Image: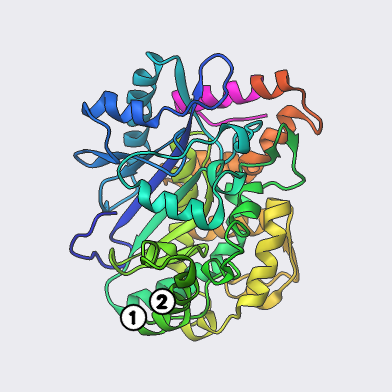
């Protein structure tokens, strides 16, 4: 989201989708994001604006990001606009013998051998990250995500939105996990990307913390509890202050006061924009109910500690929709009286309470609720010990889903 006059809560949304560029034949990664941006803009640059959308680079040269160019007032119709841009990108890549691949991790990429970092423009930031943390591993160069930005206006809206988002973060993998494979094998986790995400900056642990943000509900408290600690701890490794900005914070949702938005970062990218926007729509509907204090007052939401949320999050990384939620206090925050339920059952109940039956993304969301997150559908398609040919076939199908805007079923 670019900086504009701040919309009020639930009146401004920004969506960012990251995709891999792969070779059409082998589906191996192809570090050609600069060639793509050159083809569309006539020169290599970090970002190309196209009215209400933009294409931009990421850390790795084989990743391109498509995004809304500033906040949009509604998510309705956004998937169709993303699908149009996916088609434009694929048309340009076709001339390079390449195509876009979805999902949050390439299933057989060797990042230590294949990674090439973005060498242009804003490379000074990437070079700083690489010098401090080493960006050749999966946790840096093989992690594609969806970012959902939610606007707020002023401290009161920030606090209410941040409290609600903290509660929802641990169960997001139950909807969005799409990374069950690494190095050609099942990792044992449905959301392997998030396992790497939470540990890729352990040299400076305060940057990601427990991934679940601390209970900070004003800008002042947030800066004191989170940002100032980040800047202080990175300073010995970053004497020139290259990284000392709000985006250094790597919690699962980060406050972007420069944009008046909170950015959710825990969503694996899906098989097509329709699926990503279905997940986003479910999140927004749940957050609206929480912020409206439909089941519990703000004080009860705000008081929930980091530790139980972080424990639930770690379980969801591994089990996704089959994670058992046995914390009755947590369930009560969402108006649920059950003693325990799976995260899949939790989302089925929550969607039934909050998402309208005529929501344009409801059919795609129903596929996720019935068949499980994309990671589970991928495992069902490839089996527990897939051959390379099996992986190639299934991920070729996923590329086709992205190109056609279709849901993937096992």
Question: Is 181 part of what is drawn in magenta?
Answer: no
Which quarter of the figure has residue 199? bottom right
Which residue is found at the position 37% from the left and 57% from the top?
Answer: 149
**What segment is highlighted magenta in the picture?**
393-410
Which residue is found at the position 68% from the left and 57% from the top?
Answer: 316
Q: Residues within 10 Å of mark 2 (few under 14, many from 20)?
A: many
Which quarter of the figure has residue 348? bottom right
Residue 39 vs residue 216, the one in the foreground? 39
* Above or below, comparing residue 165 to residue 46 in the picture: below
The residue tagged 1 is 156
Report x, y in % for residue 304. Answer: 58, 80
Report x, y in % for residue 37. Answer: 30, 30
Disc 2 to disc 1: CB gap under 8 Å: yes
- Quadrant that contains the N terminus: bottom left
Task: State the scheme by which the image is colored.
Answer: rainbow
* Above or below, comparing residue 177 to residue 101 in the picture: below
């Amino acid at each position: 989201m670019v900086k504009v006059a701040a919309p009020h809560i639930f009146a401004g949304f920004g969506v960012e989708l990251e995709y891999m560029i792969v070779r059409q034949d082998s589906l191996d990664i192809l570090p050609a994001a600069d060639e793509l941006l050159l083809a569309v803009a006539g020169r290599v640059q970090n970002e190309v604006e196209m009215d209400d959308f933009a294409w931009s680079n990421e850390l790795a040269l084989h990743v391109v990001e498509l995004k809304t160019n500033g906040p949009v007032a509604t998510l309705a119709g956004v998937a169709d606009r993303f699908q149009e841009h996916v088609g434009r990108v694929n048309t340009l890549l076709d001339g390079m013998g390449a195509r876009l691949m979805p999902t949050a991790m390439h299933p057989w990429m060797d990042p230590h051998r294949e990674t090439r970092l973005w060498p242009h423009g804003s490379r000074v930031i990437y070079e700083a990250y690489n010098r401090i943390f080493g960006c050749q591993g999966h946790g840096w160069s093989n992690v594609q995500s969806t970012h959902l930005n939610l606007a707020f206006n002023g401290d009161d809206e920030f606090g209410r939105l941040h409290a609600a988002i903290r509660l929802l973060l641990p169960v997001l993998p139950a909807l969005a996990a799409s990374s069950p494979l690494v190095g050609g094998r099942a990792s044992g986790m449905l959301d392997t990307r998030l396992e790497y995400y939470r540990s890729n900056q352990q040299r400076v642990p305060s940057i990601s913390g427990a991934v679940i943000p601390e209970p900070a509900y004003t800008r002042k408290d947030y800066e004191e509890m989170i940002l100032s600690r980040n800047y202080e701890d990175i300073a010995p490794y970053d004497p020139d202050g290259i990284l000392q900005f709000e985006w250094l914070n790597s919690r699962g949702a980060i406050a972007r006061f420069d944009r008046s938005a909170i950015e959710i970062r825990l969503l694996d990218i899906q098989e097509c924009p329709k699926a990503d926007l279905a997940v986003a729509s479910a999140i927004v509907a749940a957050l609206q109910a929480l912020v409206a204090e439909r089941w519990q007052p703000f004080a009860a939401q705000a008081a929930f500690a980091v530790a139980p949320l972080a424990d639930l999050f770690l379980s969801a990384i591994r089990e996704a929709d089959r994670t058992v939620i046995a914390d009755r206090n947590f369930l009560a925050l969402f108006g649920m009286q059950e003693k325990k339920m799976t995260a899949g059952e939790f989302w089925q109940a929550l969607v039934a309470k909050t998402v309208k039956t005529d929501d344009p993304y409801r059919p795609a969301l129903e596929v996720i609720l019935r068949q499980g997150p994309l990671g589970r559908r991928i495992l069902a398609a490839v089996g527990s010990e897939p051959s390379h040919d099996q992986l190639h076939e299934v991920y070729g199908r996923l590329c086709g889903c992205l190109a056609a805007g279709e849901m993937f079923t096992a």
